[in-house]
Amino acid sequence: SLSLGSVPPVSEHLKNSSGEKINKLCGDSEWQPRFVVMTKDFFIITHPGAKEVSDQIPLYEVTNCAKMAGHSEVSSSMIAFVMDTMEGGYNGGRQYIFSVENEDQFVAWTQAINQQVIISTKLFRNLSKLQEAKERARSVLKTETWQLVFGIFIVSNFIVNIGQACIAPNSSSSGGGDSTNSKIFYAFDVVFTTLFAFELSINLFGNWLFPFFNSGWNTFDFCVVAVSIFSICYPGGPTWIIVIRTMRIFRIIRLFRKLRALRAIVSALFAALPIVGQAFVLVTLVAIVFAVVGQALFSKLSPHYFGTFKVSIYSIFKVLAMAQWGHVAEAVKDPRYGENDVDPNATLFFVVLIVTCVWILLQVVVAVLLDNFTSSCRREEKQAIIDDEEERLRSLGLTKAVTRSPLAPLLDNLALFKTSEDLSSRIQKLFEVLDCDRGGTLSYSELSDGLRKMRHFSPIIVLSQDDFHRMTNKGQLCDEEGCLTPEQFEQILREELELHMEGKIQTVYEELAQAGTQDTTALLASIKLLKMMASGRAQNSLGRGGDASPAPGSHPPSGPV
């Protein structure tokens, strides 16, 4: 999205200017009508009749809201109020001035704004403290000491579970017992469960809520700890409770996330499961077809193996597992054929079944598993190399140099254009959003503040004065007042997009070259060669004194092929 969003529904309005005439001081001297809305968190500004937000002020960043006096554009007959914002905040310390029709409107608006500012500020401070605590919890979980200590706990718990199964097997199934050994192992179980529940609580607090459950390892931890707590709260019980209680032994799998090599294998295996599952569904469907056919052909000859569908599908899976399938084949043999004769129906059925499922489809499942497993392993190895490099640089007090445009999140969005006309339309839409005063030009402050307010981009776009100076070629692409017209703005964004895409291609080229993917590397090398040749021709044209500027009405190049 290249806008600040839509005006919220009326149900969220604490107050709006419907039926009132409110003007906003735009620039230094121009008053323009505005429609304003106050919600519980924001003071929203939009053009009358418009559905999209042109500007907004977080109420928790408002430092002052009072009557405006002493401004050259506020005459003695006007009633105006000013809203000051926090330096370095969402609005960058800008001052907003609004005029109202009468004193009653002034009192109503200033009182409502100041009251909601107090409420919003308190809530924001509480949320800020909570976020700080969450960040601290996440940093603790990442420390090597924490990982080592709980790795030892996991191994110790696994050893205790093995000892419990050997020394006091009844206590492992019933959750308790009268013997001394049973009480000792039960105490160990309570201690380990408490420790793991404590770790899980910190993890859940630091990554609440969806970030926690988006991780498969966290979900597994939650299930194992929940089962452990359940087994302690309900010792003994019916058979299904005993079965659930035995899942405590799976705590050892949690160790895999602590060890990189094991984590890479398990993560790659789980990543391959969805694709393998689809292939296995195909095998299952074919097996069901053979089970139905087998029941129709052999239910009278061998009701023990093909009497019902459930028995038939079980027999088919026994054949696919190559478990005594010869006995199944002999059992369905027609009595008309002697001991040394071959039943053609049974022979054809089992030959087609084994060739189709065992020799072909099951091999496809294995091939799909192996392909996805190796791909996942490569991704894990690549991420491990990146993590090792970052850790090495941190240990040396260094930071990896990254050449990245401050407009990268915006350029990634613009790069989705389909045609040159579509790109122009996107840039024009962006210009209209940033030009909240409808002045027809963009100054550095308008551009910087507008981009920073687009919080849906990650990371937030922060455009410095030096960045603006570079993009405008030391101001040569600006008008006489140092502002950008729509045409100049489009030219700059097209040039930035071209540089951004070149950097993307170079990054992918280097990564694929390191991975040894020869075909794709050759393709990207060809693209890069074409780009160098095009650049060389342009430079030669300039060197010969030719006019390399685009024709009037045409667009500059929109980026690499």
Image: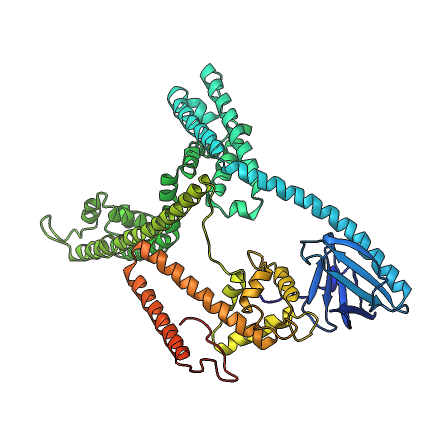
Tell me, yes or no, if residue 188 can be seen here: yes
Q: In this image, 256 relative to 516: left or right?
A: right
Is residue 303 or residue 511 the one in the foreground? 511
Residue drawn at (50%, 72%), measured in percent from left and top?
494
In which quadrant is the N terminus drawn?
bottom right
Image quadrant assignment for residue 104 = bottom right
Q: Position of residue 52 (x, y in %)?
A: 67, 69
Tell me, yes or no, if residue 242 can be seen here: no
Is residue 156 or residue 300 the one in the foreground? 156
In which quadrant is the C terminus drawn?
bottom left
Vertical side of 163 occupied by 444: above or below: below
Is residue 145 or residue 239 the one in the foreground? 145
Q: In this image, 510 relative to 22: left or right?
A: left
Is residue 152 or residue 253 the one in the foreground? 152
Q: Position of residue 368 (x, y in %)?
A: 31, 54
Q: Position of residue 84 (x, y in %)?
A: 76, 57
Image quadrant assignment for residue 296 = bottom left
Vertical side of 329 occupied by 109: above or below: below
Residue drawn at (53%, 61%), measured in percent from left and top?
409
Task: Check the image and name the residue furthest to the bottom.
Answer: 552
Task: Check the image and name the residue furthest to the top.
Answer: 180
Q: Position of residue 98 (x, y in %)?
A: 80, 65
Residue drawn at (15%, 57%), measured in percent from left and top?
344
